[in-house]
């Protein structure tokens, strides 16, 4: 985004100071002005200009007297630029150089450790991030850390969430928010709200997630960070996708995707692209979804963004599943499991993989293996406090038992899933559970009397009607076709002839 009035005034003042320092040949003033300008441009997501000024400190012949700590600061800035561009190997190499230059400065050492942890997050090394942040927070004086304390807590909280340690992440992120609000650290408060919003979305606390993400977006605008705006627009879009507001989600995703692309922020662009791919899949536009997912997967793999790579593979597997290509889907899902299982075996990603593998095995008639996988997903959801995933898997298990002919057990699970997901506000998942329940009741043999059977059919039609209503609101074309089939089966076989 363009600089606001305050940042534009600061830029003009710093450029004036730099010009005067160059005239006076004042080394200290030159270097401090260059660093301040570079940091200002980086805060405004102007990576090319930031890179230019950081490089001047390192390469300009007149700057050969720059002190090691000043050179280290410039190198850290260049590492951040490389990270945003998706150049992870280059960022790592520059941080190594920064560590050599800033070895005597404890504050710079902490900043270098923080940036290395950001690299580790992208590489799926979550345990290493938790250990590093725990060590830094446990050994440093909180007052000396200042606002950096909040930043380190946010990194640890994000790492714990990505490991599936949701309860630990929640406590840490809530504490970070308290500290940021108490100290007036606006960027830290916005970051904490963003992380809390993302965590609450994962576990199904959609109302509080919306409150946190809306507040984070307001905070992002206050600090003037387009990068943060793009992240939080995507996170809010993902929440809206879960709650059935697909048109609003798509608008936010397109904004995040296009802006990230324009700014050259690779990871943010890929993340938005993958959510867009999933939205297209849900709408039945499978070719478009495949193009988006395949492009994002390949770019993430080349850059080293492990989680985005796995998300791309997972999305491609879901597309195969939706096409009825069970064997292809299962092969791709096992590829994703092999990539991610050793990194975060208790994560939400692995929970989704277990559940989708189970669904795919059901599609292939591998009922025993399917039940084991779905049970594994259910246990993991319970252990990690993920109520949303637990009820989604209840629906999967209900459909699993329907396929096996265990109608009463299936009806109980599908009814519970639809009820609890409805309380959470997960419209798509509610509609799907209701559709499966309508299909079950339509062909069930549970009734002990004709009256009971009439009651079952009436309930089946009610569920099919509600499923259709929700799917129409979202624009879920494939599910609407399924509704047609279920409703056709529920029509009377021999309707009374109309009087002539």
Image (spheres, rainbow, N blue to C red):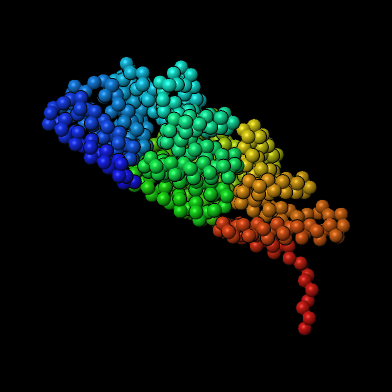
Q: Is residue 239 visible?
A: yes
The front one of 403 and 43 is 43
Q: Residue furthest bottom?
A: 500
What residue do we see at 50% from left, 31% from top? 178
Q: Residue furthest right?
A: 449
Residue 317 falls left or right of residue 76: right
Whole-percent x and y of residue 147?
A: 41, 28
Whole-percent x and y of residue 118?
A: 42, 30
What residue do we see at 48% from left, 53% from top? 250
Above or below, 399 relative to 115: below
What residue do we see at 72% from left, 49% from top? 415
Q: Is residue 298 visible?
A: no
Residue 436 falls left or right of residue 122: right
What residue do we see at 30% from left, 40% from top? 7
Above or below, 131 relative to 447: above
Count of labels in the image: 0
The picture quadrant where one finds residue 64 is top left
Q: In which quadrant is the C terminus drawn?
A: bottom right
Whole-percent x and y of residue 197?
A: 52, 40
The front one of 483 and 415 is 415
Whole-percent x and y of residue 457?
A: 77, 59
Residue 204 falls left or right of residue 104: right
């Amino acid at each position: 985004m363009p600089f606001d009035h305050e940042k534009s005034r600061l830029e003009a003042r710093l450029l004036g100071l730099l010009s005067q320092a160059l005239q006076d040949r004042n080394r200290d003033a030159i270097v401090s002005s260059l660093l301040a300008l570079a940091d200002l441009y980086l805060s405004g997501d102007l990576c090319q200009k930031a890179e230019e000024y950081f490089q001047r400190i390192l390469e300009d012949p007149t700057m050969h007297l720059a002190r090691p700590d000043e050179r280290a600061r410039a190198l850290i800035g260049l590492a951040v630029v490389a990270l945003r561009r998706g150049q992870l190997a280059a960022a790592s190499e520059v941080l190594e150089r920064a560590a050599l230059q800033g070895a005597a400065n404890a504050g710079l050492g902490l900043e270098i450790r923080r940036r290395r942890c950001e690299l580790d997050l992208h590489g799926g090394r979550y345990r290493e991030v938790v250990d590093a942040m725990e060590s830094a927070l446990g050994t440093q004086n909180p007052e000396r850390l200042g606002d950096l304390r909040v930043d380190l807590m946010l990194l640890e909280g994000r790492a714990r969430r990505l490991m599936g340690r949701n309860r630990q992440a929640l406590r840490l992120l809530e504490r970070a928010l308290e500290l940021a609000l108490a100290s007036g650290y606006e960027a830290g408060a916005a970051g904490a709200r963003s992380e809390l919003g993302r965590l609450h979305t994962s576990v199904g606390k959609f109302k509080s997630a919306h409150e946190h993400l809306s507040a984070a977006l307001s905070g992002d605008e206050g600090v003037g960070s387009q990068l943060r705006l793009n992240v939080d627009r995507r996170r809010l879009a993902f929440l809206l996708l879960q709650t059935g507001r697909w048109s609003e989600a798509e608008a936010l995703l397109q904004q995040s995707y296009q802006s990230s692309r324009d700014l050259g922020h690779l990871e943010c662009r890929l993340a938005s692209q993958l959510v867009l791919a999933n939205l297209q899949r849900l709408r039945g536009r499978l070719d478009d979804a495949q193009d988006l997912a395949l492009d994002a997967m390949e770019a993430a793999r080349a850059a080293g963004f492990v989680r985005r790579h796995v998300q791309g593979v997972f999305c491609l597997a879901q597309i195969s599943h939706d096409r009825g290509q069970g064997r292809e889907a299962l092969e791709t899902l096992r590829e994703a499991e092999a990539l991610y299982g050793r990194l975060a075996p208790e994560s939400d990603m692995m929970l989704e993989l277990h559940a989708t593998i189970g669904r795919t095995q059901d599609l292939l008639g591998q009922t025993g293996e399917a039940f084991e996988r779905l049970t594994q997903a259910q246990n993991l959801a319970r252990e990690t406090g993920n109520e949303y995933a637990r009820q989604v898997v209840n629906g999967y298990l209900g459909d699993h038992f329907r396929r096996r002919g265990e109608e009463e057990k299936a009806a109980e699970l599908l009814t519970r899933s639809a009820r609890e997901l409805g309380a959470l506000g997960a419209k798509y998942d509610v509609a799907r559970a209701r559709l499966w329940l309508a299909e079950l009741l339509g062909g069930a043999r549970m009734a002990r009397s004709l009256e009971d059977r009439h009651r079952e059919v009436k309930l089946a039609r009610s569920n099919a009607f509600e499923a259709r209503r929700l799917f129409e609101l979202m624009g879920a074309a494939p599910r609407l076709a399924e509704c047609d089939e279920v409703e056709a089966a529920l029509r009377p076989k021999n309707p009374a002839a109309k009087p002539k």
